Amino acid sequence: MKWLKQLKLVSLRARAPWIGVCLALAIGIFWGGGCGSLVLCLTPKTLSELTEESLEGAYVADSIPYLHVLYAREEAFRRDEPAGEVLGLYYAIDFGEGRYMGLCVRRGDMSRAERVMSACQVYRYGELPREKIPVLPVSGTVKAMEGGELDCFMALAGENEALAAAMLPYYVDAGRIGPRTVTAQALLALTALAFLLLALFPAVRALSGAYQRQVVAVLSQSWSRSIAAERAGQFYDRTQPVCGVRMGPEHVFFQQGPKSVLLRPWDVVWAYQDDLPRFHRQVHAVLLRTADGGQYALPMDGERAGQLLEAMSQALPGTAIGYTEETERLYQEDRSALSARWEEIRAAKA
């Protein structure tokens, strides 16, 4: 079955552009979108497990027991004017051992953080026991502060140099992996996975021989499939294609994209040139109509179509060549009349 293995590679090459594009998109989305950072969600750290050197880029899942102060707000702007919508709140939190860092919360986390902040303020006034302060569960990526955000954070120290030295320029971006939410990052990863599957599916089909099922079905009609396959392989190797179609006394072979098609010459009762609608335009094609009512369209320009039909008139003497209304009527109403010419030729050879 060496010939069938060769056809699998032909099918794989036919699907190679699609596979390449889908693979490129999958890799680009996965690496360009930082989807690899989702792995960090599988092994989150608590702040107590981190050192100052390992802070940046770490994924944290921890409970924050105390919020010191709100030091910045992130607001939405429209046309360079404040839109009155708060997008994020920045709090100073403990990192441990007398050091401090930031915490940014957004959306639903903001209301929970404000309740914790209010409880912390009541505690500072001595009106609430420390154990009554609710903890704030957060998970997110530790990022380095920069720009105005860093200025606001360091302004908390004022002129106190000791306090400034204890303030680390990092913050936990709650609910985020990189620049995106966990959900958005997961959707991006799923998109990359979808493109990967779109690349793998035709590759697996090609290598498994799915595009040669029609060929195998035709070979299986013979009393010995292995002998039929060997003879078909010899025909394939010894016959030069005419406009992509190989023709011989026992076989007609061509590719329709990745799909391999093997017919018996007497299966092809009519061949003619026609125009087919493709993507809002007409394309030339040679249509092969078979005795069982099937149809195969071979797109090609008018010159090549003429060459193929000329070659078919020589190689397939029992096939009606060219379009006429009478042939159309016979094909629709009495295909056996078109097959009769092939039956006469085969009977004469027998």
Image: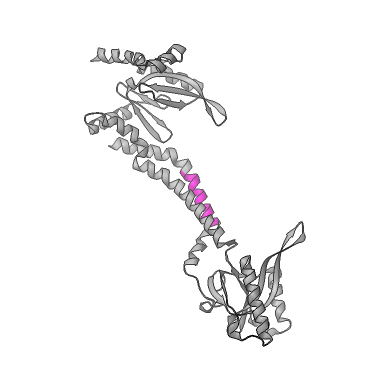
For residue 208, side relative to residue 158 (left or right): left
Assign the N terminus to one quadrant of the image: top left
Quadrant in the rendering for residue 150 = bottom right
User: Residue at (69%, 70%) from the top-left corner?
Assistant: 149
x and y percentages locating residue 239 in the rendered image: 34, 26
Judge whether 19 appears above or below 132 on screen. above
Judge whether 34 appears above or below 70 on screen. above
| Color scheme of the displayed model | one colour
x and y percentages locating residue 116 in the rendered image: 63, 77
Which residue, as the protein is rendered here, is positioned at the far bottom? Answer: 126
Camera-nearest residue between 201 and 87:
87
For residue 244, side relative to residue 33 (left or right): left
Judge whether 37 appears above or below 269 on screen. below
For residue 316, side relative to residue 70 (left or right): left
Camera-nearest residue between 286 and 308:
286
Task: Let me know if residue 68 appears in the view.
Answer: no
Camera-nearest residue between 218 and 31:
218
Residue 26 is inside the magenta segment: yes
Residue 315 is inside the magenta segment: no
Question: How many numbered markers are drawn?
Answer: 0
Q: Main secondary structure of the magenta part?
A: helix
x and y percentages locating residue 175 in the rendered image: 58, 66
x and y percentages locating residue 95 in the rendered image: 58, 79
The stretch of residues the image draws in magenta is 19-32
Task: Let me know if residue 220 appears in the view.
Answer: yes
Quadrant in the rendering for residue 96 = bottom right
Assign the C terminus to one quadrant of the image: top left
User: Residue at (77%, 59%) from the top-left corner?
Assistant: 80
For residue 47, side relative to residue 9 (left or right): right
